[in-house]
Amino acid sequence: MNITKAEYHGILLPNLNIGFDYSGTETQHTFISHAHADHMPRNRNSNVYCTKNTLKLMQRRGFKGEATVLDFNEPFDTDRARITLFPAGHILGSAMVYVESEEGTVLYTGDYRTPPSPASEGFVMPRKVDHLITEATFSLPIYRWDSHQELGNKIRTFAAETLADNHTPVFLAYNLGKAQEVMHFLSPLNHPVQIHGAGYKMCAVYEEAGIDLGRYSTYNRESCEGNILITTNSALNNGFASNVRKKRIAYCSGWASREATRSQLTVHKLIPLSDHLDFFELIQLCEELRPKKVHITHTPNADVVRHYLKQRDINSRFLDL
């Protein structure tokens, strides 16, 4: 199986004329895994395949091109392969792309998470995979996530205790995916939430998909005090809620596992809520699938992952080389 990294964006199966999260024009069939900016086509007028919710979210982020919508678990045939999308559990709409051809089977995971985000369509893995293409963002054994129940409790407890002390709680989270997941965890509190405008415009897609986001509105500087606030770190540094003197800030990210992050960001609470799988979940998944080869991408520590896979007699390579 010929699997290559595109020069500047995406991954290609050139023999099958297929691209994953690819922005070039050399391939006939380009599949977009989800609507985060680093996976969307940079050419906003591209012709791509994706899920219904990914298309809706991409359009809210400015995508103007044509897209063929594919349903999960419904095979689609090209001239050289059969394609099936499986839910990836990363954010709403996120999909893994499963390719069956005479050259064998390939699973491109994009970004994925198991156990899946409760604000997604879930996670389903095909049974037989010859070539697994996986990101390894959190590729060191220091990264092991708490359960969703524990994380949800931490988020709600921080908000409730901060409000009880007459402070305004602020959660730092990405505008797409992480913000809506935090809102979903907060919904049982039934306390009003204000979210940054860039994240607000994504929320309707989640509600249309049946995800409960609680009581929320878009950020209003004049009325935000006393609400639960959700924004990005960059927006906070650019004046978001700067008029609120009594506030406490929680940083929601897998990178919150590092205590040094607290002083780097000057926050009150670190909540390691990730939309990627942790190191141990990645190794376990590879053990369960036992593909002929694991192709590792998007990682700062490929050698560590390869070392652990080799100990388990699993062949691998760093795809970015």
Image (tube, rainbow, N blue to C red):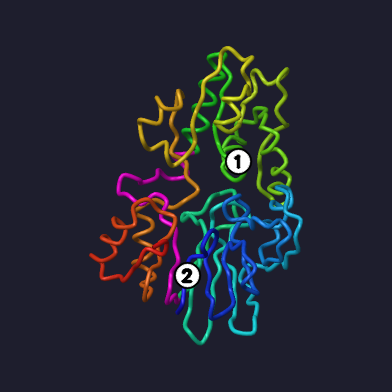
Q: Position of residue 303 (x, y in %)?
A: 29, 57
169 vs 141, left or right, is right
Residue 75's tag is none
- Give above or below for 161 relative to 308: above
Span highlighted in magenta in the image: 128-151
Q: Residue at x 42, y 27 (%)?
A: 264
- Give above or below for 196 relative to 266: below
Nearer to the camera, 182 or 8? 8
Q: Residue at x 60, y 84 (%)?
A: 80
297 vs 206, left or right, is left
Nearer to the camera, 18 or 250? 18
**Nearest to viewer (mark 1 / mark 2):** 2
SS assignment at label 1? helix
Nearer to the camera, 114 or 231? 231
Membership of 138 in magenta stretch: yes
Neighbour tally class for label 2: few under 14, some 14-19, many 20 plus, Cα within 10 Å: some
Q: Earlier in the sequence, mark 1 or mark 2?
A: 2
Residue 4's tag is 2
Residue 184's tag is 1
Q: Position of residue 91 (x, y in %)?
A: 58, 51
Membership of 288 in magenta stretch: no
43 vs 293, left or right, is right
Please tell me in which quadrant of the rendered image residue 187 appears.
top right
SS assignment at label 2? strand
Q: Where is residue 289 in the image (x, y as percent from the top left)?
A: 39, 70
Q: Residue furthest bottom?
A: 102
Neighbour tally class for label 1: few under 14, some 14-19, many 20 plus, Cα within 10 Å: some
Query: What secondary structure is the magenta-colored segment mainly?
Result: loop
Question: What amino acid type should be assigned to the residue bearing mark 2?
Answer: Thr
Q: Which residue is drawn at 45% across and 79% down?
A: 1
Question: What amino acid type should be assigned to the residue bearing mark 1?
Answer: His
Nearer to the camera, 221 or 204? 221
